[in-house]
Image: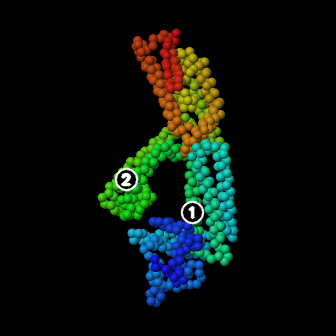
Amino acid sequence: PDFAPDLDQQPWFKFWTRQELLEMAFFSATFATYPGSGYVVDIENAFVRNDGEIQLNTIPWGQSDYLNVTFSELKNSRWIDLKTRAVFFDFTFFNPNLNVFLVARIVVEFLPSGIAEIFRTFRIVDPFRFGTATTTDLILFVLNGVVAMITFYYLIEEFRAMWTLKWKYFKQFWHWVALVNEALLFALLGLTAIDEMQARSLFVDGRELNQGDLQSLGFMLDQEKNLSGIVVIIMWVRFYKYCTISRKLSTLTRTLAKSAASLFLFMILFVIAAFGFALGGTLIFGADTYNFYNINISMFTLLRASFGDFDYTDWSSNRVVGPALLVIWCMFSNAILLNIIVAVVCEAFTNVMMENEDLDEKGVKSVLDIFLESGLFGRKMAARLQRKRNQIGDIETALSNIDKDGDGTTDINELEAWIKSTGADKLLGITAIELMAKYDTDGSGQLDQEEMEEIKEFILKEKEALTPAQNTEELDIDQDMGRRGYSEMALMGGAWPSQGTEERILTIEGTVLDIKNKVNMILAKLDTMALAAPPDSPQRPQTTGALPAVRVAYRGDVHKIIASKTVVAED
């Protein structure tokens, strides 16, 4: 209560607000956040006298006259006492070769426990980054203007899309990414303009440059760099959107899309467990180690421990509970939760690869696949289609010589031999049994000349319609993929069918095809068994004259396909 220093003799005891000091509103160090106001000693220079005492030449804040004081006098005046929480040492260097400032701040924090912790910041401040003195400066200035115009243009486009799509706009993941990216770019432009105006205001003729000016400017420039880095990261993430033109390139985003729901669920479980362990760790180790000083630091320490990065000294500060808590956390987070997350991602990746294989088997082409296969102006595509037409021509030629025994008819064995030798099943998408069932109109089990002519006409039509059919098929498939698009080829689905629905559709379709192929195999085996049985066997159909008629029919309803076969005598 009786402490009343003479402010003329001891001006360092005068309290200054942050506005008077031109300081930032607050400054965050290691353990606490401090206001910009306080008590100031402005040291112009210092030297050691002959008697070993440190002489300080100070300039009281707001004055121009020097005040000489020794370090002992400053210390004995109790300028730093038990109530002092932090001492800031600010100094600045200027590099005339680069025209930049090095703004340094060293903070010594005095904790109630008696510990003194040092926190350092060093910032490079370039107040002359935008100029027109040289050609390079002028080009940089113009390029920044171009970036500003592009940002405004795309921001307007995003608002137009929002106005057009209404609430549907917010159902697409990539729309959110684009909106956040444009908003941050707009904020970055505004922050850059503010920083530039603040920098130029510091070097007005006749204005004295203060330490607080450079500290606040350096802080704002740091935030500008941080925001620039975030914007660049988001811009590069947006490149994944354009990977949807290829199934292989979109594997990552489709895998994340399929596993997003499960990953979100397990992340919630992980955060719940981590928060509980963080609370316990803060209570147990908070007074012993900085890595559990508060909840935020404890959460980060637990995250590092989940990946095996931990300091056993911190955990063993409590030698009974600490090691046990570390083992329990590592087993729960690493051996259980993280492995479950890996399993979920692996399952989604397997589903995506199976979808790719199914689509490849069906001949579905993505936009990039068609472009790469077509080459410049479609020369490669034309060559590929020409090869297919030539192959179908070879099939047509081989069909003329299909009757090996020369009896004027074609049986199922000759059809199968023709298909295997020419690969007609892959090009035409039809098997020997299906050909026999489709074109054996009289049910004799043999194809006569008229029926063979119908097959030749079918092959001729396929040959003539190959080019438009191939192109149309691929384009229609790609358009259909585009309509299903965001769930199949992009990261997140929106208004289109969900991932679960499409997976069920693909599963049902694959099951139906498997059933159809198995039925064909069973019917073919029945044919072989019936024809190979002895004449007097009850398994062999008793017919006279020609071979029995083999009729295969498929009929389906909503849930199943029924295949039936009838073996009857020719009469």
**Amino acid at circle 2:** Trp
Image-based side of 386 in relation to 551, left or right: right
Which numbered tag is attached to residue 329? 2
Q: Residue at x 59, y 33 (%)?
A: 391
Residue 22 on image: x %, y %: 59, 71
Query: Do tag 2 and tag 1 residues touch (Cβ < 8 Å)?
Result: no
Which residue extends farthest left? 320
Residue 229 vertical position relative to residue 260 in the rendered view, above or below: below
Upstream in sequence: badge 2 or badge 1: 1
227 relative to 387, above or below: below
Q: Determine if residue 304 is in view.
A: no
Residue where numbered disc 1 is placed: 223
Q: Amino acid at mark 1?
A: Gln
Q: CA distance from mark 2 to mark 1?
A: 35 Å
Q: Residues within 10 Å of mark 1 (few under 14, many from 20)?
A: some
Q: Residue at x 53, y 23 (%)?
A: 556
